[in-house]
Image: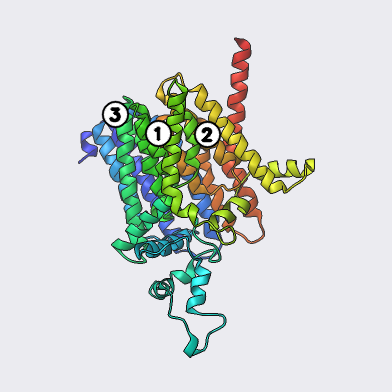
Amino acid sequence: MILARLPRHGALTLTAIALAAIVFVALLGWLSLATGGWPALVLAIVLVIAGVVWLALPLVIGRVGRSATILRALIIIGLAARLALLPSPPLYEDDYVRYLWDGGVTAAGLNPYARTPSSILNDIHPLFPQMPRTARPPSPEAILGGQSNGVLERVSYPSVTTIYPPLAQLGFAAAHLVSPWSLLAWKVVGLAAEALTLWLLMGGLRAAQRSPGWAMLYWLCPLVIKDFANGAHMDVLLMPTLAGLIWAMLTGRLRTAAVLIGVAAALKFWPLLLVPGLAWRVKKWPHRIALSALATASAALLLAPQLLALDPASSGLSAYAESWVRNSLAFPALKAIITALAIGGDPALLTRFLVAAIVGGLALRWGVRAANAAPMATIAAWRDTVLALLLLSPTGYSWYATWLVPFLVFTPEAAAMLLVAFVGAYYARFADRTGWGAAIAPWTGFAPAWIAIVVTGLRQRIADARG
C-alpha cells in the first residue's frame, strides 16, 4: 500500500533498503547460531559490506528524505530490524553478563562497586571451608549469586569490580526489575533508549531546520543495529544524552547542555572532552567558568558512588585505564616511538598521557575555533574530538564508534563515516588463534579514516597555497 502511493524512484529506494535490511538481519541471525571461528570472519565481512552500503545513505536521504511517507517507512524498517534481532544471542560478546549481574546487585539495594564477583563466589564456594560451628552466615551478595541462574559464574574478569558508572547501573537495574537476569529485558531497555534517541535527533534536526530524514543515518546504521539490538552494549544508554545535548546546543540552552554533558559523563567518562566546545559558546570568562563548573559538578555528583568506592587493587576502572589495549592502530605505533626514544618510565603509561594531552588539546583548539560560528560548528568540533579519541585510543572496540553517529546525523564527514563503516572489521580478531585476525582488524577498521584525514589535509593545504 505504501509503495503504491510513492513515486517510482521512492518505491525502488524503499524496496532496496528493506531488502538490504532483511538480508543483514538474516545473516546476523544465522551467524548467531553458528559455531567455530569462521563465523567471526564472515561477521566482519558482512559488517564492512553493510557499512559501505550505509555510506550511500546520505545520497538517498538527499533525494527522498523530506517525504513523510518514506520517513515513516524507514522508521518501520529500522524498528523491524531491531525487533528481529532482540531474541538473537550476542555475537562474540559477553559484556551483557556483567550488566545482568550489576543490575541484580543494584536492584537489591547493594553497592555494585563494593565487591568483586570472585570474592562473592568464594563466599558460595569457599577455597578454605570453615568448620560448621564457626561458619559465617552467607552474605547478601552470595545469596543473590545463588539466585542468579548462573549469571554470577559467567561474569568476565571476575577479579575486578565493575567499570560501569552509576547511571548505567540504574539502566541495568531497570532491566532486572522488568525481568530478573534476563538478556531480553535488558535489550528492551536498550530499544526504549534508542526510540528516545530517534525522537531527540529528529527534534534537533527540526530545530536546525533540516530534514528529519537525516536521523536515518543513526536509525539505519548497521553498526548501531548490530551492537545494540544484537550485541546489547550499554553504550545504547549514552545515545539519548548525546542527542539531547546536540538539541540543547542548537537551541541555545547552554545550561541544559552543561548538565547533559555531566549526565553523559556519568555513563562514559569521555564526554567531559566536550566541555571546551560548550564553554567557548559564551563570550565572558565568568560565564565560561560557570558552564564548565556546572558540567563538571554534574558529572562529579553522579559519579560519586563509583569514585568514592574506588580501590586500585581491585577496581575494574583502574585496570581498564592503566593496561587495556585492544584493536588499536595508532596507540601501538606511538608506544613503539616512545619506547625507541628511551625517554624513561613506563612507555605504555607515557603513551596514555600523550594521547590524553593530544585529544584534550585538540578538543580545546577546535572548541575555541568554533566559538564565533553557528552552533553547528561546535557540533562538528565535538564530532572531530570524538573521532580523534577513537583513532588514538588504546582501545578500539567497534561499538565505541557508535558514539560518532549522533554527531554525523547533523554534520556528516568523510573520515568519521569511514570509521563507522569499516570498524566492524574488529570481529575478524575472533576468527583465528594464530593472530592474523587481530593483526588485520585495526588496519581494516581504522586505515580508511586515517587516509581520508590525510587526503583532506593535503587538499586543504593545496587550496590554501593557491589562495
Marks 1 and 3 sit apart, C-alpha to C-alpha, by: 15 Å
Nearer the observer: mark 2 or 3; the answer is 2
Q: Is residue 133 left or right of residue 343?
A: left
Pair 2/1: label in front: 2
N-terminal-most mark, 1 or 3: 3
Instruction: Give the residue drawn at x 61%, y 60%.
Output: 432
Which kind of residue does numbered mark 3 sit on? Answer: Arg
Image position of 94 (left or right of 338): left
- The mark found on residue 318 in the picture is none
Residue 62 in picture, x, y percent from top left: 36, 27
Residue bearing the label numbered 3: 66
Dot 1, how many residues are within 10 Å of its Cα: few (below 14), some (14-19), or many (20+)? many
What is the image's colouring?
rainbow
> Does residue 217 show up?
no
- Which residue is drawn at the image coordinates 74% and 42% (left, top)? 338
Q: Is residue 67 above or below residue 346?
A: above
Distance Cα–Cα, label 2 vs label 3: 30 Å
Callout 1: SS: helix
Spot occupied by residue 90 in the image (x, y as percentages of width and height): 44, 59
**To which quarter of the image does residue 157 belong?**
bottom right
**Disc 2 marks which residue?**
385
- Where 124 falls versus 464 (above or below)? below
What residue is disc 1 on?
409
Which amino acid does the dot numbered 2 rest on? Thr
- The CA span between labels 2 and 1 is 16 Å
Query: Amino acid under label 1?
Result: Val
* Residue at 28% from the left image edge and 32% from the top image edge: 8
Residue beneath the point at 55% across and 26% down? 365
Instruction: Categorize mark 2 by other alpha carbons within 10 Å: few (<14), some (14-19), many (20+).
Output: many
